[in-house]
Image (cartoon, grey):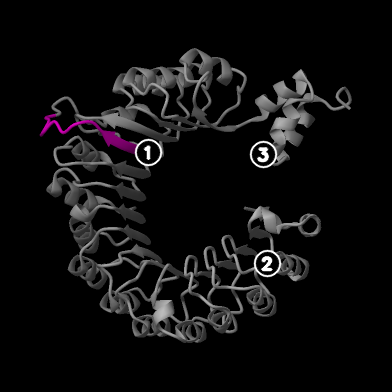
Amino acid sequence: MDTILCDELLQEIFRRLPPPSSPAISLVSKRWLRLLRSSKSSLSLSLSPPFSTPSSLSAFLSHHPYLSSLSLSLSSATNTTTTFSDQLVACVALCCPSIQHLRVLAAPVSVSSLLSLSTSCSNICSLTVSLSRPVSFSWIVCFRSLKSLSVILSGRDLGEIEYADEIGCESGFELESLCLSGVRQGDFGLNWLWMNCKKLRILHFKSCESVGDNALFSGFIKGLQTLQEVELRTCRGIVDVILFNLAEFCASLCSLLIYDGGSREGLLYFIRQCKSNLRKIELRLPLDLDNRHLLGIAENFGGLSSFRLQSCCLVTGEGLKRFGVALSNVLEELVLINCDVIERESGLLSTLGQSLRHLKKLDLSYNDSLLDKELVSILVSCNYVCELKLRGCSGLTSAATVSMLKNCKLLESLDMRNCCGIEEEAIRLLVMNSQRLRRLHVEEYKLSGVVRMLALNKGIELLD
């Protein structure tokens, strides 16, 4: 067999095999090991001895000549100086000239190292790195193919820094996605981005306290005609200024996510004044979200297709019911994760189901008090659901699967992890009788040999 199959055919077979097969393949012969390595296009490495030295990493990467995606992270026992991170980047520049997606989750990388990387790896379109203060971004123009950039800022505050050498980029650059983490007061290097980013579609902030100069940021939003997605995670200090500018100047926004930080009035102002036709909203604001916001969303965003809500402590059943009625003809995805209103308001899911009959995706994960009868009451009305997530709903029993089989004829993806009341026999019946199921998330101990064989024959992917 080893001599009959040519290298190209073996490599194609290796690419199609599931990842758990790799260790067994590598033991067959040296040829198979070589071909397996050369067939890899993506690697994620958590570096620890002996690969925590640049020479060892270089030797390892040299066996993978066709990598297009690489992620490097370090174990806690590994040296994490800037010099070491620069050495890792140098290894990538030397061994992976065709790399397109690179993540270096280690100590900050120096600007000189990034400039060298841009020369050796001109095809990089996605980059994730850590930078130390004072922050500078003018090196971005050297990455001609860069579309997506994620930067984590670290180090002590250095106060306001002047960047006289950072002139404007007249020709612009192609950056479409930007994620900033850890921005603080005094990080005025961001101002160069606000003056030169003209084509951003995606903007994310994580654990940020500032946006640099507020006036420049406002001008950036005002002049940006392409922004479609904004995420704000743990950014309480800047949520209002961002939402105000989005409401005033942005008409292209399609998706908004806010987690763990906001103000009730700032959010309400955005909802009422926003000129964009939002299609997706995702909120986790336990103490900042109430019925006024829900009703405002329903009134101002009549084309909303996806609404994702987590930990809605101040929202009532009445508010959700009115929200459902208002969006009954357009909403296709409803997510209520860890929302105690489901427990407080008996019959809430039944009413929502009767209003939202066009739902295709339903996520009720981590509602540990959710009972079979409540789940059944919404599934009876939502016959178009093709994706259902019930992870962590420990109150459900095997009886719930009967309703899934009866009412969810279009179900393709189901997540039932950590549903301790749903037993192995129910999983077997579900796999055996589901007509369209293609993906099932469930604990491995609930999967018997019979279930695995049934899933294989029906083309159902089993994930734990």
Image location (x, y in percent) of residue 288: 25, 67
1, above or below 220, in the image: above
Q: Nearer the viewer, mark 2 or mark 3?
A: 2
Quarter of the view holding residue 176: top left
Position of the N terminus, as image quadrant, is: top right
Q: Amino acid at mark 3?
A: Pro
- CA–CA distance in space, label 1 to label 3: 28 Å
Q: Residue at x 30, y 27 (%)?
A: 139
Circles 2 and 3: CB atoms closer than 8 Å: no
Magenta-drawn segment:
150-162
**First along the sequence among labels 1 and 3:** 3
Say whether residue 35 is magenta.
no
Q: Which mark is residue 423?
A: 2
Foreground pick, 382 / 76: 76
Q: Is residue 173 visible?
A: yes
Secondary structure category for the residue under label 1: strand
- CA–CA distance in space, label 1 to label 2: 44 Å
Q: Amino acid at mark 2?
A: Glu
Residue that lies at the very extreme toward the top in this rendered image: 55
- CA–CA distance in space, label 2 to label 3: 28 Å
Residue matched to label 3: 19
Circles 1 and 3: CB atoms closer than 8 Å: no
Residue matched to label 1: 149
Q: Amino acid at mark 1?
A: Leu
Say whether residue 158 is magenta.
yes
Q: Residue at x 45, y 29 (%)?
A: 75
Secondary structure category for the residue under label 2: loop
Foreground pick, 144 / 383: 383
Foreground pick, 344 / 92: 344
**First along the sequence among labels 1 and 2:** 1
Left or right position of 247 against 327: left
